[in-house]
């Protein structure tokens, strides 16, 4: 069964270890960030670029979002969890409609769960929390939380063209993907094909190389995307900023 990570609970855990942060998260997590509140949030110099790009184009690609050491730790954790058998074949649909469909996608996932995250995972989630606040502040999307999972595409894995949200329904508003492949090189496959015009699956697209530390964001109901067949194991963390449903 999926237990999705609610970042606000995770933050509380982190705050018990880092009391300076506690004050920060006592503000309503669903509201757009209030001035001084934002100032002390652990942040990234990449956020203004990402938020502006989301605003102007509906998508953003940010190489080196994480530095290589932080990315490597997450990649090793993905590998360790895989070796321990913690991943499950990914399905299509949600809740009781969830079905494994090998024609549509061939990846495996492990959800980030409350109380079970490592320090490296919490550090990444804290950065995403500050990204959520920055997006809310500039774009007024009312993003409430984040749910996410590690994903592994074994050799031959792919995910056919899809939207992450039906345009008029669902709580997933912004898709966020972090790639964890240290030695990726041209020919390894597994690129993300991201169509750049809203609701368009035939026109212009970007091919994003799934290199360690690269972050991709896009409006989940607007942009068709596809994972091209991977020629070797491909690792990532995929998730969504959600609104309250
Ligand atoms: O890993 C990627 O590049 C995209 C994954 C994806 O589209 C999804 O999990 O919905
Ligand atoms: Fe997707």
Image (cartoon, rainbow, N blue to C red):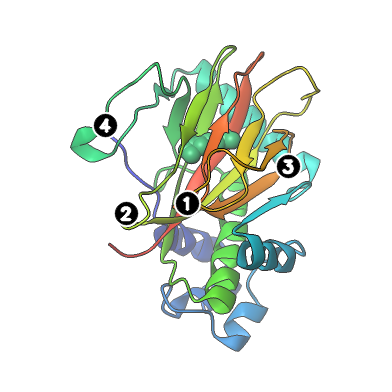
- Looking at the picture, how far across and down is residue 112, in whole percent? 45, 42
Q: Is the residue at mark 4 in contact range of ligand 1, meaning its CB lies under 8 Å from it?
A: no
Nearer to us in this view, 172 or 150: 172
- Mark 2 Cα within 10 Å, few/some/many (few <14, many 20+)? some
Q: Does residue 19 appear anywhere in the picture?
A: no
Nearer the observer, disc 3 or disc 1?
1
Q: Nearer the viewer, residue 147 or 72?
A: 147
Q: Are circles 4 and 1 on residues that touch, CB within 8 Å?
A: no
Confirm or deny contact between disc 1 and disc 2 (CB under 8 A).
yes
Residue 172 place in picture, x, y as percent: 40, 54
Numbered badge on residue 213: 3
| In contact (CB < 8 Å): disc 3 and disc 4 | no
**Mark 1 closeness class: few <14, some 14–19, many ≥20 residues within 10 Å:** many
Kindly state the secondary structure of the residue where label 4 is placed.
Answer: loop
The N terminus - image quarter = top left
Q: Earlier in the sequence, mark 2 or mark 3?
A: 2
Q: Earlier in the sequence, mark 4 or mark 1?
A: 4
Give the alpha-carbon distance from disc 4 to disc 2, as whole Å: 15 Å
Cα distance, mark 3 to mark 4? 30 Å
The residue pinned by badge 1 equals 220
The residue to which callout 2 is attached is 170
Quarter of the image with the C terminus in it: bottom left
Q: Nearer the viewer, mark 2 or mark 3?
A: 2
Closer to the chain start, of discs 3 and 1, is 3
Q: Is residue 210 left or right of residue 186?
A: left
Residue under the point 56% across and 49% down? 176
Give the alpha-carbon distance from disc 2 to disc 3, as whole Å: 28 Å
Q: From the Cβ of disc 1, is ligand 2 less than 8 Å away?
A: yes
Secondary element type, mark 3: loop
């Amino acid at each position: 069964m999926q237990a999705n990570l609610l970042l606000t609970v995770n933050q509380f855990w982190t705050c018990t270890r880092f009391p300076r942060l506690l004050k920060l998260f006592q503000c309503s997590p669903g509201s757009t960030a209030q001035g001084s509140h934002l100032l002390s949030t652990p942040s990234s110099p990449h956020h203004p670029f990402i938020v502006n790009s989301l605003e102007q184009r509906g998508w953003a690609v940010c190489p080196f979002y994480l530095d290589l050491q932080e990315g490597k730790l997450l990649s090793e954790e993905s590998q360790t969890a895989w070796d321990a058998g913690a991943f499950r074949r990914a399905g299509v649909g949600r809740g009781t409609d969830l079905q494994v469909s090998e024609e549509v996608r061939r990846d495996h996932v492990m959800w980030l769960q409350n109380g079970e995250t490592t320090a490296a995972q919490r550090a990444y989630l804290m950065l995403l929390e500050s990204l959520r606040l920055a997006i809310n502040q500039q774009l007024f999307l009312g993003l409430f939380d984040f749910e996410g999972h590690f994903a592994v595409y074994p050799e031959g894995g792919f995910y056919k063209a899809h939207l992450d949200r039906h345009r008029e329904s669902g709580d997933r508003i912004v898709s966020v993907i972090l790639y964890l492949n240290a030695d990726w090189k041209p020919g390894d496959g597994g690129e993300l094909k991201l169509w750049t015009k809203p609701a368009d699956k035939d026109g212009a697209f970007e091919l994003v190389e799934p290199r360690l530390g690269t972050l991709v964001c896009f409006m989940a109901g607007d942009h068709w995307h596809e994972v091209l067949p991977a020629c070797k194991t491909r690792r990532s963390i995929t998730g969504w900023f959600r609104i309250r449903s």
